Amino acid sequence: MQSISTQKNQQLDTTDAEALRSSKFGQLFEADRNRLYTYIYAFVSNHSAADDIFQETCLVLWREFDKFEIGTEFSKWANVIAFNRVRHYRQAQKKYQLGLSDDFIEEFSQNITITENQTVTQEEKWRYLEHCCSLLSEPLKKIYQNFYVDKLSAKDLAETTGRSIHAIRKSVFKLRKKLFDCVEQKLREASK
């Protein structure tokens, strides 16, 4: 027979695990909710239907969250569940089929997934670019700021720095090459 203290500890462990699970789900879901709604809406093109499907999807995501493997892509997992909810809804509500076959819808889903993967790559590139910019020497950081952020021309930069236009263009070329090489290196490291 377990002691009362052991039972309380087990209850606390269960409560802590549930709180951690709830917190992790909340973080992942909040980061993906708008994209997920857009994904669903792309299939039905009706806000009322998309709202219903989104709510059903949210419930299934929560119920099935124990099956989600932390560290994998939440959006891909959520897409599979949302796609199944869309198919179920389309079967129940024939008017949302829009004359489209299930094969077409399946292909459409795959195309959306490919597009989302490319978007993720773009977001990664932007993060890598920010990181690479932080590694630049102070003179190159100034050129980056002036040329790309403040949108000054090479002529304007030459006038304000006292350097020739040719020297400014050479520095911009060096800056571009350095950033491009750095981002490419980060992408190669990430793909390993």
Image: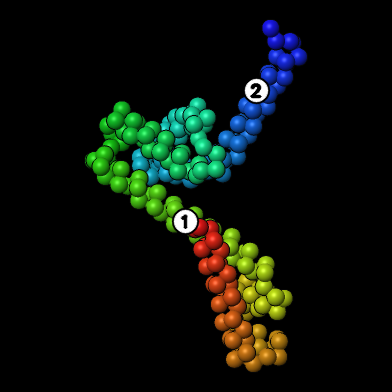
* Left or right: residue 83 compared with residue 123: left
> How is the structure coloured here?
rainbow
First of labels 1, 2 by sequence position = 2
Task: Name the quadrant of the N terminus.
Answer: top right
Q: Counting other residues with Cα less than 10 Å from the Cα at mark 2, is it few (<14), some (14-19), or many (20 or more)?
A: few
Q: Position of residue 30 (x, y in %)?
A: 57, 40
Identify which residue is drawn at 64% across, 32% down. Answer: 20
In the structure shown, which secondary structural element does the residue marked by tag 1 occupy? helix
- Say which quarter of the image contains residue 40: top left
Indicate which disc residue 14 carries: 2
Q: Are marks 1 and 2 in contact (CB under 8 Å)?
A: no
Q: Position of residue 130 (x, y in %)?
A: 62, 64
Q: Residue furthest right?
A: 5
Regarding residue 58, the answer to whether it shows in the image is no
Q: Position of residue 187 (x, y in %)?
A: 52, 62
Q: Residue furthest top?
A: 1
Residue kind at label 2, given as amino acid type: Thr
Pick whichever, 8 or 130, lies toward us: 8
Q: Counting other residues with Cα less than 10 Å from the Cα at mark 1, is it few (<14), some (14-19), or many (20 or more)?
A: few
Q: CA distance from mark 1 to mark 2?
A: 38 Å
Pick whichever, 134 or 2, lies toward us: 2
Identify which residue is drawn at 43% across, 31% down. Answer: 52
In the structure shown, which secondary structural element does the residue marked by tag 2 occupy? helix
- Say which quarter of the image contains residue 166: bottom right
Indicate which disc residue 119 carries: 1
Q: Is residue 160 above or below residue 55?
A: below
Residue kind at label 1, given as amino acid type: Thr
Identify which residue is drawn at 44% across, 53% down. Answer: 117
